[in-house]
Image (cartoon, rainbow, N blue to C red):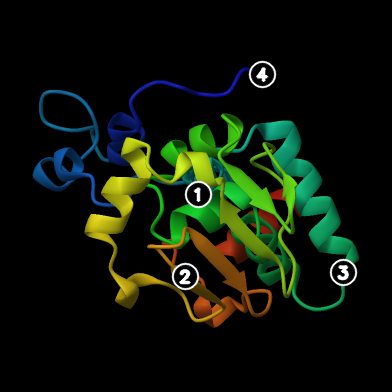
Amino acid sequence: MARYTGPLTKKSRRYGVDLVGGDTAFERRPYAPGQHGRARVKESEYRTQLQEKQKARYTYGVLEKQFRKYYETASRRPGKTGDNLLILLESRLDNVVYRAGLARTRRHARQLVSHGHFIVNGVKTNIPSFQVSRHDIIDVKPRSLESTPFIVARETHNKETVPGWMDVSADAGRILIHQKPVREQIVVPIQEQLIVEYYSKI
């Protein structure tokens, strides 16, 4: 299955949640696509669980096969499977760049990572799904610091939005990972237990 690269606003309206982050088009029309929005239908339990899984997939920009692997990994780890799943998704390098405020959206962060703008612990890393770990140091490549995306990031950076499990110096283009995130630090409109229930039935 190819990665969805179309407009995310339409997906946001379908699932009733901003999948982009600061999507003004969704805020203006937060109802399902169509002239007057989709007609109200009775939601089956399966449909509700499927939609929650799809919402998570589109939020993090993950393909179905890869998302299933995340779930399987999460289910093998100690603790709650749903919590583990969100922690794995939050620990993706592209998400870390987005959470750090160095990219406008996760999709933008994925592009920046794929184009080779980041170094992790001294090693160039261009894999968006790379899992960051405690004590990792993520730097913008020195020659990339003066490119437009990172100039804009420095000028618009808001430290208040940076999660507590990392420290960010926008001026230096550096992210320090203190720890893996815990569920309470992950602010996403996702009910992970519905995803666990979905996979437990297939």
**Which quadrant: the N terminus?**
top right
| Residue that appears at 52% across and 50% down | 52
Q: Earlier in the sequence, mark 4 or mark 2?
A: 4
| Residue that appears at 37% across and 37% down | 147
Q: Closer to the camera: disc 3 or disc 1? A: 3
As shown in the figure, which amino acid type bears the numbered disc 4?
Met
Would residue 75 appear left or right of 13 to someone viewing this image? right
| Callout 1–callout 2 Cβ contact below 8 Å | no
Q: Closer to the camera: disc 1 or disc 2? A: 2
Measured as percent of width and height from the top left, residue 103 is found at 39, 48
Query: Which residue, given by chain and number where applicable, does mark 1 sit on?
Result: 48
Residue 168: image tag = 2
Residue 191, relative to residue 10: is it above or below? below
Q: Secondary structure at mark 2?
A: strand
- Gap between marks 3 and 1 measured at Cα: 25 Å
Q: Earlier in the sequence, mark 3 or mark 1?
A: 1
Dot 4: within a 10 Å radius of its alpha carbon, few (fewer than 14), some, or many (20 or more) residues?
few
| Callout 3–callout 1 Cβ contact below 8 Å | no
Query: Which residue, given by chain and number where applicable, does mark 3 sit on?
Result: 77
Residue 1: image tag = 4
Would residue 94 appear left or right of 155 to someone viewing this image? right
As shown in the figure, which amino acid type bears the numbered disc 3?
Arg
Q: Secondary structure at mark 1?
A: helix
Q: Secondary structure at mark 3?
A: loop
As shown in the figure, which amino acid type bears the numbered disc 2?
Val
